[in-house]
Amino acid sequence: NAGVMQNPRHLVRRRGQEARLRCSPMKGHSHVYWYRQLPEEGLKFMVYLQKENIIDESGMPKERFSAEFPKEGPSILRIQQVVRGDSAAYFCASSMGQGAVYEQYFGPGTRLTVT
Amino acid sequence: KQEVTQIPAALSVPEGENLVLNCSFTDSAIYNLQWFRQDPGKGLTSLLLIQSSQREQTSGRLNASLDKSSGRSTLYIAASQPGDSATYLCASMNYGGSQGNLIFGKGTKLSVKP
């Protein structure tokens, strides 16, 4: 049973380019969460999605960031017009259902570097 | 707003020692508290999850306790080994909202010397 998969593992973008980060949840999981870990900082929640729905985007920056989890395929975190401050590790987690009783399982992360 | 703090930020111990990692939180209205391990350049591995109604959880050499009234959790590692070297994170799941938002501390970086 494969775990949460994220790709690419490392991504380098120049300022102003777009970054697309992909997350495939564990088999049987329909809930996906994105977190960001800035250098020397803890992980911060960004967004929580279910298939075709955004459940909670309270941690998403208001501009340039968007997320989706289509009916088919992986969840995508999109960052438009990247800036140096976007350099971070982005982690995806998945769970079987909604609610605190369902444990979140984390992927290996995508490390974004903006030059 | 929940704040999760982990002290110390870094800890170095000789192999074989028993040790305690601390996690404190400001809002006791939590569903659960979870301890993770993060290896350099890797993702998070869940170690122990304590529901709010529980006092402790054990897995092998690890024991995590939870005291909601004082806003504290501890992770006890017995007979530490070099392979335990990693960053240990605690995270709370709070009441309110979507129940999808884990709130993390910044972690304790543990180094176990052979």
Image (cartoon, rainbow, N blue to C red):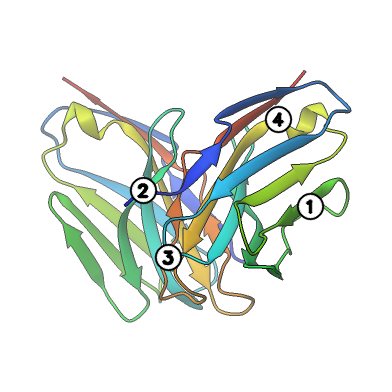
Instruction: Evaluate whether label 3 is on the same chain as label 1.
Output: yes
Question: Upstream in the sequence, badge 1 or badge 4?
Answer: 1
- SS category of the residue bearing label 1: strand
Quarter of the figure that contains the C terminus of chain B: top left
The residue sitting at 59% across, 65% down in the picture is: B2
Q: Label 2: which residue? A: A2
Give how far across and how far down residue B81 sits, in percent.
16, 31
Residues indicated by labels 1 and 4 sit on the same polypeptide chain: yes
Identify the element where label 2 is drawn.
loop
* Residue A42 appears in the figure: no
Mark pair 4, 2: CA separation: 28 Å
**Cβ–Cβ under 8 Å for marks 1 and 2:** no
Q: Which mark is residue B101?
A: none
Q: x and y percent of residue A11 in the render? A: 65, 26
Q: Which of A84/A107 is in front? A: A107
Which residue in the protein does label 4 denote? A87
Q: Residues within 10 Å of mark 4 (few under 14, many from 20)?
A: many
Determine the residue positioned at 38% across, 33% down: B39
Frontmost residue, A6 versus B32: A6
Q: Horizontally, is B88 left or right of A89 in the view?
A: left
Q: Is B106 positioned to the left or the right of A64 in the image? A: left
Q: Secondary structure at mark 3?
A: loop
Residue corresponding to mark 3: A28
Task: Pinpoint the chain carrying mark 4.
Answer: A
Q: Amino acid at mark 1?
A: Ser
Left-right relation of A86 to B107: right
Q: Earlier in the sequence, mark 1 or mark 2?
A: 2
Report the amino acid beneath label 2: Ala
Question: Disc 4 marks which amino acid?
Answer: Ser
Residue that mark 1 sits on = A66
Q: Calculate the distance from the C-alpha at mark 1 to the C-alpha at mark 2.
A: 26 Å
